């Protein structure tokens, strides 16, 4: 049985689908990393993608807050700006 060295853990393992996943583009039709390593990569990638989702959510919230803040200051500016007659007669 031919063996194949895994690119991830550099361990020589039997070149079978039991240890490697099938990969159409490779000559031996097997992935360059063993199943254990692929599983590990997968978990890492998943964790990273989850982290990214959280980060983008934070950015999203920050953007919304900035927009709200802008609207708030805009409103204050309008309220603060002197208005003609109406404001003068009703305030005093
Ligand atoms: Zn491996």
Image (cartoon, grey):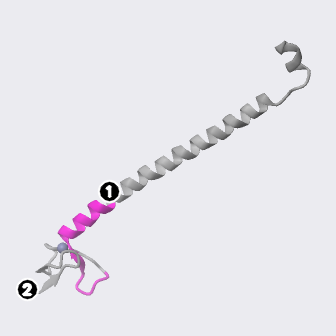
Q: Which residue is mark 2?
A: 1
Taking 49 as reference, is 82 above or below it?
Answer: above
Horizontal arrangement in the rendering, residue 15 relative to residue 22 (left or right): left
State the image quarter where residue 24 is shown.
bottom left
Does residue 92 show up magenta in the picture? no
x%, y% of residue 7? Answer: 23, 79
- Which numbered tag is attached to residue 65? none
As drawn, the residue found furthest toward the front would be 92
Q: Is mark 2 within 8 Å of ligand 1?
A: no
Q: Helix or strand or loop: what does disc 2 sit on? A: loop
Residue 22 placement, left or right of 75: left
Verify whether residue 37 appears in magenta: yes
At x 76%, y 34%, the residue is: 77
Q: How many marks?
A: 2
10 Å crowding of disc 1: few (<14), some (14-19), many (20+) = few
- Depth check: give the residue in front, 25 or 7: 7
Q: Position of residue 47 (x, y in %)?
A: 32, 56
Q: Which residues are magenta?
A: 25-45
**Residue 71: x, y in percent?**
68, 37
Q: Residue at x 88, y 18 (%)?
A: 88
Residue 4 horizontal side relative to residue 24, left or right: left
Residue at the farthest left position: 1
Is residue 82 or residue 64 the one in the foreground? 82
Q: Which one is earlier in the sequence, the residue at label 2 or at label 1?
A: 2
Q: Is residue 75 left or right of residue 85?
A: left
Residues under numbered marks 2 and 1 in contact, where contact means CB atoms less than 8 Å apart: no
Badge 1 marks a residue whose secondary structure is helix
Q: Name the residue tied to disc 1.
A: 47
> For the N terminus, which image quadrant?
bottom left
Residue 65: x and y in percent read: 57, 40
């Amino acid at each position: 049985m031919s063996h194949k060295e895994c690119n991830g853990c550099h361990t020589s393992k039997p070149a079978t689908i039991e240890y490697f996943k099938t990969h159409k583009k490779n000559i031996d039709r097997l992935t360059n990393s063993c199943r254990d390593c692929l599983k590990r990569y997968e978990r890492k990638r998943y964790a990273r993608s989850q982290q990214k989702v959280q980060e983008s959510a934070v950015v999203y919230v920050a953007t919304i807050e900035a927009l709200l803040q802008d609207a708030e200051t805009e409103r204050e500016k309008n309220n603060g700006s002197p208005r003609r007659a109406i404001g003068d007669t009703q305030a005093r």
